[in-house]
Amino acid sequence: MTAAGMSPAQVRFCALIPARLASQRLPDKPLAEIGGVPMVVRVARRATASGAERVVVCTDSERIVRACEEHGVEAILTRADHPTGTDRLAQASALLGLDDAAIVVNVQGDEPLIPPAIVQALARVLDRETDCEIATAAHPLHAAEEFFDPNVVKVVLDHRGRALLFSRAPIPWSRAEFSKMPRGSLVPESGKLPARLPALRHIGIYAYRVSYLRRFPNLSRPPLEEHENLEQLRALYHGAAITVMQWDAALPPGVDTPSDLERIRAVIGTASG
């Protein structure tokens, strides 16, 4: 079922926003001002609009905590040595005293244009799929260039809409159609994918049951994750069920670089004007 087809029933969930001050490509990224407001605060406001009963920024920086508090956003200080954002969420869930059955949506602190609807929809999907520990999202892929791009993460699902595998490789592979590509070609000449190929691009947003977050820091990192550099493969390797909500299209791009920041500033400035 797509998110558009779900009922608007309310689900209780928290939105946690991991935010590290250090960034190689954009120093002090969470505090970068967009329309006079720190980016992480804008993200928190989008998360609040999703209907989350609690929105908390989880950070390693006192400066981020102060900036959030100045704008009425709840923030907590977590350790600086967390290897991943999920480790930070695990500590935050413990500090906040969240119950094992609680649902947490991980909203990235560098996505000030994230649609509140997808945050709520993901929480509802995980609430419905009671035997899954994680929910994430994907949208259909049509362009061959994206399908063969290793920076685009693909996901293959089973008949219940649960993840079988995530990969940077072009999956699923069409043996019949792709064998026709000219030798040395990286994409089909048409630039399109074969009809009915169930190609899905993973959208990097997650909802978790707190019970999984408590287990996560103790899960070993398998070779598959090390090679693909995809953290969600750790969950699959250790037997966690991941349900995948199909969304209509890609989310608005986030902020990684100074040029991304200027683009977002222009978009928000235009919307405000």
Image (tube, grey):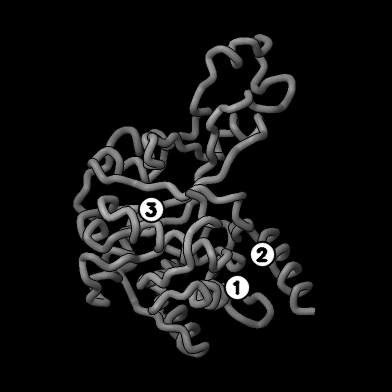
Contact, CB < 8 Å: mark 1 with mark 2? Answer: yes
State the separation of the CA atoms marked 3 and 1. Answer: 30 Å
Picture layout, residue 267 above or below residue 130 = below
**What numbered label is drawn on residue 135?**
3
Residue pictured at 53% horizontal, 71% vertical: 30
Where in the figure is residue 13, as x and y percent of width and height?
36, 71
State the residue position of label 2.
261
Q: Nearer the N terminus, badge 1 or badge 2? A: 1
- Asked if one can make out residue 99 in the rendered structure from this viewpoint, the answer is yes
Q: Nearer the viewer, residue 171 or 225?
A: 171
Q: Count how many numbered circles sit on residues in the image.
A: 3
Relative vertical location of residue 172 with respect to residue 238 in this rendering, above or below = above
Q: Which residue is mark 1?
A: 32
Q: The disc labelled 1 sits on which kind of residue?
A: Ala
Q: Amino acid at mark 2?
A: Leu
Give the image location of residue 89, x and y in percent.
Answer: 33, 65
The residue lying at 63 percent from left, 76 percent from top is 33
Tell me the quarter of the image containing the C terminus: bottom right
Quick check: 100 above or below 35? above
Give SS at disc 3: strand
Could you say whether the residue bearing mark 2 is in a helix, strand or loop? helix
Of badges 3 and 2, nearer the viewer stands 3
